[in-house]
Image (cartoon, helix red, strand yellow):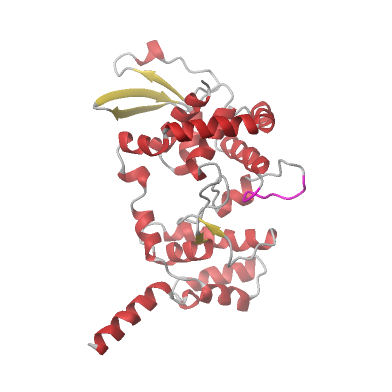
Amino acid sequence: MKILLLFITIIISFSVSADYSNHEDARSVIDELVTKHGFDESYVISILKDAKRRDEMLRSVASPAEKTKTWDEYKKIFLTSKRIREGKKFQDVNIKILEKAEEEFGVPKEVIVAIFAIETNFGGNKGSHRVIDSLTTLGFDDPRRSKFFRSQLIEFFILARENNMNILEVKGSYAGAMGLPQFIAESYRKDAIDYDGDGYIDLFNSVDDSIGSIANYLVNRGWKREGSIVVQSYPNNVRKYYKPHASLTHFIPLKFVEKGKELHFMGDDNFRAIARYNISDVYAMAVYYLSEEYKK
């Protein structure tokens, strides 16, 4: 019995305390950080040694709501009366900066608010996982997207250095997304902007920076002022209902089953830009539905 308990203890310990500095794919990460980005090798190794394997992250990334829920199920999570009510309040409180972003970037304030609502419930759920644990677990042990997460691990090291963050204390989602808008490390470095004028980009605490960064992210993914996100259409008569602006380049036929009824839409550049935020059509449609509620 004692031997069995010892064996179980060892297995559990391994599942939460893997030395990623010795992982077969760690050498390439260490070498890139040292040779290309000027990190001290002993520092990188010490961080990788401290990182913990989290099996719940592997399970979560393998079955996200965007892939496992039907449209009706997904919609029920985010299109609630409480989230609509809180979104309108958030919009009222931050109206000046939202209107500034809408004017500058061409992204409607309601869309920005909807992304806030879905990503972190207006800052109420920014994630409780150490980002270093998320990115090492997924970067070294995820069977499908490990290469992508290793690239984000490298970006995270650089981001932490650039912004004087304690790399072992930064918290985020199970997939390593951070802050009020839930940016991955690469997006934080490339798309985040200082929008409150204090000279520092802070997506963890600054609503203004987060608002400007969401708008900038969408523009960098192809958002067009002239777009309409989606227009409801009918399979055999699309042209009658959908007349795209000449500047738009992407037209995506979409089908959603809502309460047993098939609904057809045409999405344009703006739908595609939103979908890239979470690599999901149902996510983009939820943003659209919420944004329409915030217009009322």
Q: Nearer the viewer, residue 191 or 214?
A: 214
Residue 104 lies in what quarter of the image?
A: top right
Q: Tell me if residue 223 can be seen.
A: no
Q: Tell me if residue 25 can be seen.
A: yes
Count of labels in the image: 0
Q: Quadrant of the N terminus?
A: bottom left
Residue 70 is situated, as x and y percent measured from the top left of the image, at 30, 38
* Residue at the bottom extreme, as displayed: 2
Residue 77 is situated, as x and y percent measured from the top left of the image, at 38, 39
Which range of residues does the magenta coloring cover? 198-205
Vertical relation: 260 (above or below) 69: above
Residue 280 covered by magenta stretch: no
Residue 203 covered by magenta stretch: yes
Q: Nearer the viewer, residue 133 or 171?
A: 171
Q: Nearer the viewer, residue 120 or 232?
A: 120
Vertical relation: 64 (above or below) 214: below
Residue 129 is situated, as x and y percent measured from the top left of the image, at 49, 60
Vertical relation: 246 (above or below) 33: above
Residue 56 is situated, as x and y percent measured from the top left of the image, at 37, 62
Q: Residue at x 57, y 32 (%)?
A: 89
Determine whether, in the image, residue 269 is placed left or right of residue 16: right
Vertical relation: 30 (above or below) 91: below
Specify the principal SS of the magenta part. loop
Determine whether, in the image, residue 186 is placed left or right of residue 58: right
Determine whether, in the image, residue 73 is placed left or right of residue 111: left
Q: Residue at x 35, y 28 (%)?
A: 254
